[in-house]
Image: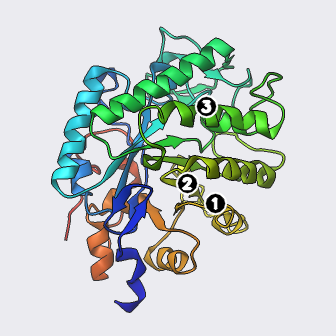
Amino acid sequence: MSGNKIMFTPVKLGSIELKNRLVMAPLTRMRAIADAIPNPLAKIYYSQRAGAGLIITEATQISPLGMGYPATPGIYSIEQTAAWKEIVEAVHAKGGTIVAQLWHVGRISHSSLHPEEGLPEAPSAIAAAGQTYGADWQLHDYETPKAMTSNDIARLLRDYKLAAQNAKDAGFDGVEIHAANGYLLDQFLQDKTNQRSDEYGGSIENRIRILTEVIESVASIFPTDRIGIRLSPYGSFNDISDSDPVSLFTAVINRLNNHNLAYVHMIEPRSTSAGGNDQVNEGAPVTSEIFRAAYHGKFISAGGYDLAMGEAALEAGLADAIAYGRLYISNPDLAERFKANAPLNPYNRATFYGGAEVGYTDYSAL
């Protein structure tokens, strides 16, 4: 057991107390029911995994326009909030801690998912390369999004505030703002997708502005020490990139240092499985090594870790907690298995997205 010391010690992320340093990463599962309401099975799914120090929910859209895939849950209606409240209560009943990940996909969407709202919205009217799933679960070419106006941005900030209020009403221990993986806030940060000429575009300082405003909007509901941010420097998922990522994300981190956040959660680019493949990008920079020193607060690292790698990162001070994704899909009791050095259930990729119990709530515990 001597090699596994730090992983099983408690840690405080802001004012969120974790019993261990295993985090269940946000995992899109596409099992929501009509009206983007979380599946009743989600109560079982999340409470099965309450052994984690922290559960971060699957990405949850803050508005109809924030939706990018079929059957993802929202947190903007009374009915959605009521369903999340049951999930949170089930996790708390098992001694777990859970935060809601607030999501807007921007251009990574299709108008069939929000027919009343029309085209997806983004910082600039630049279509993503490739195809995405529409409401019919079939692949469609990405549409050219509508460039957001200042009124659209004002509405977005109101949507974040409402989602945060709903998360608070549901009893969540905090929220994570999703600013990674080529979704809307990441599209504002990176210059491949942000070619605006107003106060939200151009300089790095301008491109960071919306992230600051979103934090302030959410912080009108939750204290900042219950708010986390997810970032993915060097990530290329969803056709995203920046001409100078080190300068950009160093500036982002410096700005986040002013907010007394619960944590920053970074995705290592060596793991490019955000879309479902298990490729490992061996030559990728290690973001925790580049950016950890710049951030003054608590740091979660995600990206293809096993127990030994996670423990090594904790021992080296490169992270305060380690997020596990695929391993948490197939091992509801991952923390207990790690502690006992027990074998792990293999995951079945075919059941990651869509469906019901199979591959969701039917993986065995020890």
Q: Position of residue 278 (x, y in %)?
A: 54, 59
Q: Position of residue 318 (x, y in %)?
A: 59, 71
Foreground: 210 or 108? Answer: 210
Amino acid bearing label 1: Tyr
Q: Is residue 4 visible?
A: yes
Q: Most extreme residue toward the left, as rendered?
A: 93
- Quadrant of the image occupied by residue 129: top right
Provide the residue designation for mark 1: 295
Question: Label 2's element?
Answer: strand
Foreground: 251 or 104? Answer: 251
Q: Position of residue 153 (x, y in %)?
A: 62, 20
Q: Is 174 positioned to the left or the right of 249 in the image?
A: left
Q: Is 94 positioned to the left or the right of 241 in the image?
A: left
Task: Determine the residue positioned at 34% across, 89% down.
Answer: 1
Provide the residue designation for mark 2: 264
Q: CA distance from mark 2 to mark 3?
A: 17 Å
Residue contact at pointers 2 and 1, CB within 8 angstroms: yes
- Whichever of labels 3 and 1 marks the residue nearer the N terminus, that label is 3
Q: Badge 2: few (under 14), some or many (20 or more) residues near its Cα, within 10 Å?
A: many
- Quadrant of the image occupied by residue 31: top left
Question: Label 1's element?
Answer: loop
Q: Indicate whether 148 appears above or below 281.
A: above
Provide the residue designation for mark 3: 213
Amino acid bearing label 2: Val
